[in-house]
Image (cartoon, grey):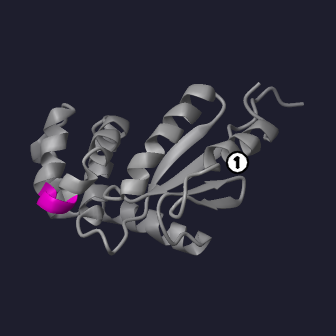
Amino acid sequence: MSDAPAPRPVLDVFFDLQCPDCHAAQEDLRLLRERYPDSLEIRIRHFPLAKHRHAYAAAQAAEEAWAQGRGEEYTAALLELTAELGARGEAVLVEVAKRVGMDSDEVETALIDGRHLLAVDADQAEGQALGVHGTPTYLIDGQVLDGSRSQDGLREKIEQVVNRLPADG
């Protein structure tokens, strides 16, 4: 018998960082993190939609934020500004980086040199393979939950799945 703890359930959340519905979903994610701080791993995945002109650059900037240790803070701050990002573009990405204490010059460089393109493309390709069409979309225990039409009841569905899955002992 192994003493290794069971792996934590994983909730993959496919986001477009220019998406107002993804901004609205942040509260559900905050509540899930609060309720399951040690028993649920939440991973933000990139799924920039073509209709959002700056979403692809935002995903790359978010990857740079994760590389600088500020990913969660940067993503949350950027999702507060979806309309501004749509209106003003990449300048917002750099301003948010400065505000959360990142090296904003490095964010600009990452957007130019494309160092995070493969990570963004890989998330998007995986999302497409799993049937993701809009954002936010949640994947847990093989179930795809589409939040792009409505967030109503999704957190409760996720909680039901988490509560029946094995978690760390």
Report the residue at 55% width, 58% height from top: 150
- Residue 53 percent location from the top left of the image: 24, 70
Q: Is the magenta stretch mostly helix, strand or loop?
A: helix
Name the quadrant containing residue 46: bottom left
* The C terminus - image quarter: top right
Which quadrant of the structure image shows residue 83?
Answer: bottom left
Residue 104 in the figure: left or right of residue 72: left
Q: What element carries label 1?
A: helix
| Magenta stretch: includes residue 88 | yes
Q: Is residue 57 left or right of residue 127?
A: left
Q: Total of numbered circles in the picture?
A: 1
Res 37 seen here: no
User: Which residue is identified by label 1?
Assistant: 157
Please state the horizontal and vertical placement of residue 132, each as a whole percent of the image. Answer: 54, 69
Which residue is more in the foreground, 137 or 98? 137
Is any part of residue 110 visible from this angle? yes
Residue 20 coordinates in the image, percent (x, y): 36, 55
Which residue is more in the foreground, 129 or 82?
82
Image vertical order of residue 114 relative to residue 166, above or below: below
In this rendering, is residue 23 above or below 146? Answer: above
Q: Which of 85 and 120 is in front in this view?
A: 85
Q: Is residue 40 above or below residue 90?
A: above
Which percent across, then down, holds residue 14? 49, 58
The residue furthest right is 1
Relative height, residue 161 to residue 127 (above, below): above
The amino acid marked with disc number 1 is Lys
Residues drawn in magenta: 86-90
Question: Residue 92 magenta-drawn?
Answer: no
| Image quarter in which the N terminus is found | top right
| Pointer 1 local density, CA inside 10 Å: few below 14, some 14–19, many at least 20 | few
